[in-house]
Image (cartoon, helix red, strand yellow):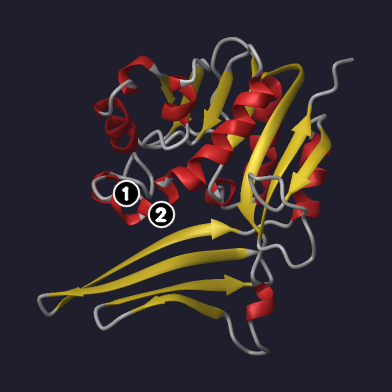
Amino acid sequence: MDDEDGYFGEAVAATYDESAADMFEPGVVDPAVDLLEELAGDGRVLELGIGTGRIALPLARRGVPVHGIDLSRAMVARLRAKPGGDAIGVTIGDFATTRVDGTFSVAYLVFNTIMNLTTQDAQVECFRNAAAHLEPGGCFVVEVGVPELRRLPPGQNVVPFRTSPTQWAFDLYDTATQAMSSNYVEVVDGRGSYRSIPFRYVWPAELDLMARIAGLRLRERWAGWAREPFTGESDRHVSVWEKPAD
């Protein structure tokens, strides 16, 4: 990937909000913002992968000071164009390693974005980076799906998640390396296009170990932002790790 914006350059940023419209619905956004606001208290929050501001903007409207890190200038430009977007500080860079001034009550990483880091080393560095930004007693919050390997019968490594006469989308898994990719095929006016975005899927227990390496400890884990119990049937989790106050 040669684009300085990574896999979220202008072509993706231009239609990102529309393509993920269901994730912008109040019923999805509000519970996340409620929890993050509660955890933040009177402190500042840091969003890793702030994107177009789906979570940051409503948090800021509630009076929570928000700063963001994002590699994609194209995505951040969409944030800046929205009401209130120009008041949110954003540092351009890789959220696994980029540092900003000051400390925060909460750092958070939502909507599977931890999987955009495609190596275990990068994911470990992300935890270390988040921990370095937290004040004592602060929290790192991650929302991510549980790997859907139960949907793979023996010998299969592809899971389709969208099909229509003109659009096909599927996830491709490599269970030996935990590498995966989301792949999109679209036909418009008889011409086809193909786009692939790489990820690295990660297990809850693996994230807990990354947190321990970074000096954090698990405080809570739920199946969603409404704090539903996390079970063996949960397809995602919202996890909160805490930086010890001592």
Seen from this angle, which residue lies furthest left?
189
Placement of 9 over or under 178, stated as above or below: above
Q: Amino acid at mark 1?
A: Tyr
Image coords of residue 150 (percent x, y): 69, 77
Give the residue at mark 2. 22
Q: Amino acid at mark 2?
A: Asp
From the viewer's perspective, tell me whether residue 227 is left or right of residue 100.
right
Placement of 97 over or under 146, stated as above or below: above
**The C terminus is located in which quarter?**
top right
Give the residue at mark 1. 16
Image coords of residue 45 (percent x, y): 58, 21
Q: In this figure, what is the number of numbered marks?
A: 2
Looking at the image, which residue is at 49% across and 26% down? 59
Placement of 74 over or under 187, stated as above or below: above
Element marked by disc 2: helix
Looking at the image, which residue is at 51% across and 15% down? 65
